[in-house]
Image (tube, grey):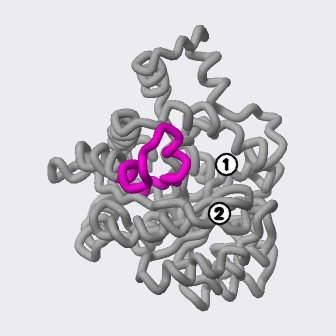
Amino acid sequence: MNIQNLNCLIDLHLHLDGSLPLHTVKELAEQQGITLQMTDGELKKKLSVPAGCRDLNEYLTKFEFPLTLMQTPEALEKCMHDLLTELEGQGVQYCEVRFAPQLHTQKGMSQNEVIEAVKAGLYSVAGVKPESIHAGIILCCMRGSDNGQQNKITVEEAARHLGSGVCAVDLAGAEALYPTEQYADLFAYAKQLRIPVTIHAGEAAGTESIRAAVAMGAARIGHGIRAAYDAETMELLKEHHITLELCPTSNLNTKVVDSIGQYPIRQLMDAGVAVTINTDNMTVSDTCIQHEYQLLADTFAFGDTQIKEFLYHAAEASFTTEDIKQLLKARITYTF
């Protein structure tokens, strides 16, 4: 199977602010009167991590510049529109794009206005034609020391928009600095409001973070790669039918593993843990979903059987309607 020709790909873990197409950044800068004074190569270097990226904390600094451009309704609508258009061209049939509304309020927008702007971009592309990409929005709460009220608002906005563009909530940010269990009350509130939950865990912290996310009601775990080093944690994930959103290139960037050959995906698969393949941040990590699949196929000799399995897991774990899940599965079956 030629991965470049697949038109049934799914990306469940994709950050809007870390995945802006280069042309979008240039156009936004021009529209906002910002003179970049750099070549495309220099701009790409500004937006993407170097090979020597030390850890997740350094990785997160690459979001600072894009966020300055994403503070108006027009900019946010354009960002979502351009990203979905690019994904369609890569053979993605379904994606869930995540962002933190509280990071886009620097020029006075409310979180609700932020969400409405991104939804406008979504609806300008997703589902427009029968063959169009389908997409959902995941709202990220942020780890931090002084943003509890903003996180609460994010959860409440997720409840308000649930089923109308928004499909879930997440917890993102500096995992090692702000342990997952500190947000138990916040996600108990999300559970009370019946909002589906995914949580970044087991990326920059260990298995205790993954176990906390499970206890907090996560249906999926963002990254979760460190579960592979602990049999009890893998059994816990399997027992609770929790799917991992693996992001191989990103994990290489943040030094979760030293090389792709050491990526413990087979250990997870052998333990019966459901895993999916995702990009995390297309621009920050200079990747795309096709590259992620090709990287794993080349490294671990994965063929059609494994690729189909990853895609089926993604379709089944998606935070969407049963009708769209069946549509995704039908296209996967037809393709393979």
Q: Which residue is mark 2?
A: 223
Does dot 2 land on a helix, a strand or a loop? strand
Q: CA distance from mark 1 to mark 2?
A: 9 Å
Q: Is residue 193 magenta?
A: no
User: What amino acid is found at the position of numbered circle 2 in the picture?
Assistant: His
Amino acid type at circle 1 is Ser
The answer to whether 320 appears left or right of 181 in the picture is: left
**Rendered residue at 57%/65% (across/down):** 149
Residue occupying the point 34% across, 34% down: 74
55 left or right of 7 in image: right
Find out whether residue 107 is within the magenta segment.
yes
x 46%, y 15%: residue: 33
One can see residue 110 in this view: yes
Look at mark 1 in the image and give the residue it sits on. Answer: 250
Residue 171 image point, x, y percent: 60, 65
Residue 299 in percent (x, y) is at 68, 51
